[in-house]
Image: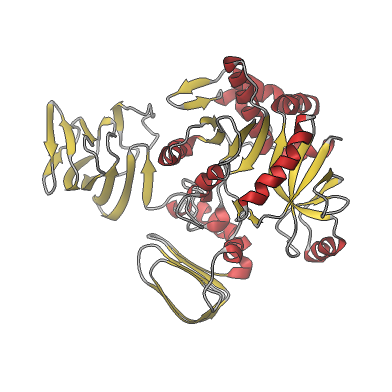
Amino acid sequence: MLTPVILAGGNGTRLWPLSRRDTPKQFLPLLERRSMLQATLARLDGLTTAMPIVVCADAQRFLVAEQLREMGREAEIVLEPEGRDTAPAIALAALCQQARCVDDSGDGGALLVLPADHYIADVAAFHEALERAQSAAMQGAFVTFGIVPRHPETGYGYLQVDDISAGLQPLRRFVEKPDAMRARAFLEAGRYLWNSGMFLMQGERYLQVLAGLRPEMHDAVTAAWAARRTDLDFLRPDAPTFAACERESVDYAVMEHIDKAVAVTLDAGWSDVGSFQALWDIAEKDADGNVLRGDTVVEATRDTWVQSQSRLVATLGIEGLVVVETADSVLVADRRRAQDIKTLVARLDAQGRRESAAHRCVYRPWGSYESLENGPRFQVKHIRVRPGARLSLQRHHHRAEHWVVVSGTARVTRGEEHFLLSENQSVYIPLGVEHRLENPGRIDLEMIEIQSGAYLGEDDIIRLDDDYRRDTNDE
């Protein structure tokens, strides 16, 4: 028995403009139709596991829940009040496992810690490596998965072992990301593995070691967990208590300081998908080495990633670039400098640009909306509401709205009125009037919303009743 722990935090800034702060890469279908989170969960098929524990940010809670629903999977979703890196996140998962075992009078086995944004081509090889690691973990060892290096890589940390061809062996030391010369030396030595960030360990043992090495962190996380509350399908540790916890990775806080650390060798086509270069390395290419996604036309183009989401993208006479178009942004970059895209995102953040944080299509627990056009005193949105879902009962101080049903059926509350709208029918919601939109049908409700008024921000929402218990300023 294993308890999978899926770490679904992180921003994925190196994959902007596909990945945004509100919708990071782990929730995107970068390499297949399902998202990376969904692919990580599917990778567990065939293993004997307890219900997974997903640790994520509060802002992505409904996105996690929706992607689980799409798969027909269940998981306990633990919300990090603030990002504090992997050591506190794993501690929250270990405490969740303990509470579950007390409630169920059972044993969840070892914690299998997996980042939600990694790619593994050979799932069978991953399962074989996991099988080799389980006996060591159940004897109290802390197991990390080391990746057989394919080339000198400066973007990963390394694990020093005795021989990378051995299946399971003592971990000698962690090594920071090297420069190019040291990376080549590591590859030639045959004693260094890439640090994957995947672990197998007993949860109770992890908490004991953390208490000895980082007592302040252990106490803060434990107190935050003890004061947790249940919010719909989510577990919320206490935010002020958790905020006292220092930010530190599990490598620094625990793994580098223990004697019983072992490495299991994994050669399974692994990637952390940390940049467009990493994506290009593993994606299927055409005869000219290009990766083409969406509506694209290329001529005299080689070794380039070209992606379109909302319009035609054409290239001519280029090589070794990344060209990505979304509804609100276009990136053109040297593929060899893909790691530096985070500096562009930092500049956008400094300028207060919304494009660094959110796409034009924004996901909500009831569905999604996309801003199609906006200008002085008006905005046009495309709204999609899932079957059986409804928006909050709300009103606005500064805007009125016109709704036009494109497909499906809408149930509308407007003041004291309650009525249905079908295709091509519309309704006017005056400024200040209480209103609600819901989908009573079996297919998605799609509609166009035209807003007009002096202020059109998403924070002009006064929620009077909400199925999802969101605060007024929680979009």
Relative to 31, is 57 above or below?
A: above
Between 285 and 300, the one lying in front of the other is 285
Seen in the picture, residue 278 relative to 320 is either above or below; the reply is above
| Residue 197 makes an appearance in the image | no
Foreground: 453 or 321?
321
Q: Position of residue 381 (x, y in %)?
A: 27, 50
Q: Residue at x 72, y 24 (%)?
A: 204
Residue shown at the point (35%, 38%) measured from the top left: 459
Residue drawn at 32 percent across, 27 percent down:
466
Going by the image, does 187 lie left or right of 222? Answer: right
Q: Quadrant where the N terminus lies?
A: top right
Quarter of the image where the C terminus is located: top left
User: Residue 473 versus residue 174: which sits nearer the camera?
Assistant: 174
Q: Say left or right for 385 vs 347.
A: left
Q: Position of residue 7 (x, y in %)?
A: 59, 39
From where the camera sits, is residue 223 visible?
yes
Give the colouring mode of the picture.
secondary structure
Residue 322 in percent (x, y) is at 53, 69
Left or right side of 181 for 222: left
Where residue 221 sits: x, y (%)? 65, 25
Q: How many marks?
A: 0
**Residue sitting nearer the eye, 398 or 275:** 275
Q: Is residue 405 above or below residue 243?
A: below
